[in-house]
Image (spheres, rainbow, N blue to C red):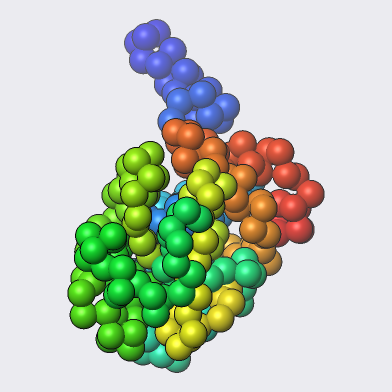
Amino acid sequence: MKKRVLAAVLAAVFLITGLGSPVFAGKGKVKIGYVEWACATASSNTAKAVLQEKMGYDVELIPVSGAAMWKGLETGDIDAMTTAWLPVTHSTYFEKVKGDVDNLGPNLEGAGIGLVVPQYVTIDSIDQINANADKFDGKIIGIDPGAGIMGKTEKALEDYNMDDMKLVDSSGAMMTATLASKIKNKEWVVVTGWTPHWKFARWDLKYLKDPKGVYGGAEHIATVARKGLKEDMPEVYAMLDKFFWTLPEIGEQMGWNAEGSDPYDSAKRWIKENPERVNEWIK
């Protein structure tokens, strides 16, 4: 009997103090969808860290494809995402669901996409790629096939008549691994690229000019929520609506992740070191 009483007391202590498994304030569960790109991983984990560590919500990050992420918002299976590249990259997805989601506006300005090469590559424009196809082994190294940049690159192959080139499906990690290997050997390579990304801090890279404007101009990354989140979880909606940071801020966190840090640990470190910015989101 005494053992049962003691066990009950200890269980209560763990529940109250949080010494056992994480205990949240009963505010509910938030599901954030994201594609496992470097920028999306950083922003999604940051949103999770603020909502969970500072505001007491139970947050689940759901890695999905780009198409599934937008579909999940439309159906309400995902509450929000911090990874909408607009107005160009995700325009096809957004147009299909814009009446069924809430666009909360930019959380990052100055984003962009295009084709990227090392600085030692002696061409400067996409319209010079095909004439040098042999130096690139006839390949543009891409990422996951559902990404918006992949669709734009397929269009670039057509518009720039790159008959001797093909787009290779890959992933963000495989793309950067290929880039690292080629740079180590001073070989020519062209990859799908976007800003923000830690690769620009690690290597001396350049975007190729895009005279036909296939990849569009400067973009922003927006936060998008499912319909009804504002009414269901107004505090969560308000925080996500205020969530905004800069290229250097996200770049710092992506750099930690690229060095091997766990993304959620990086996010917790970042919000601890940037309390003034976090307070702007939750006040």
Horizontal side of 131 relative to 200 (left or right) equals left
Between 72 and 192, the residue placed more toward the observer is 192
Position of residue 240 relative to residue 55, above or below, is: below
Q: Where residue 2 appears, x then y in whole percent?
A: 39, 8
Residue drawn 47% across the image and 40% down it: 258
Q: How many marks?
A: 0
Residue drawn 41% across the image and 52% down it: 60
Between 59 and 193, the residue placed more toward the observer is 193
Q: Where residue 130 appears, x then y in whole percent?
A: 29, 75
**Residue 160: quarter of image:** bottom left
**Residue 242: quarter of image:** bottom right
Q: Is residue 31 visible?
A: no
Quarter placement of the N terminus? top left
Q: Where residue 27 appears, x then y in whole percent?
A: 53, 54
Residue drawn 34% across the image and 41% down it: 185
Between 89 and 158, the residue placed more toward the observer is 158
Residue drawn 57% across the image and 69% down it: 111
Between 72 and 159, the residue placed more toward the observer is 159
Q: Is residue 190 visible?
A: yes
Position of residue 115 relative to residue 8, above or below, is: below
Quarter placement of the C terminus? bottom right
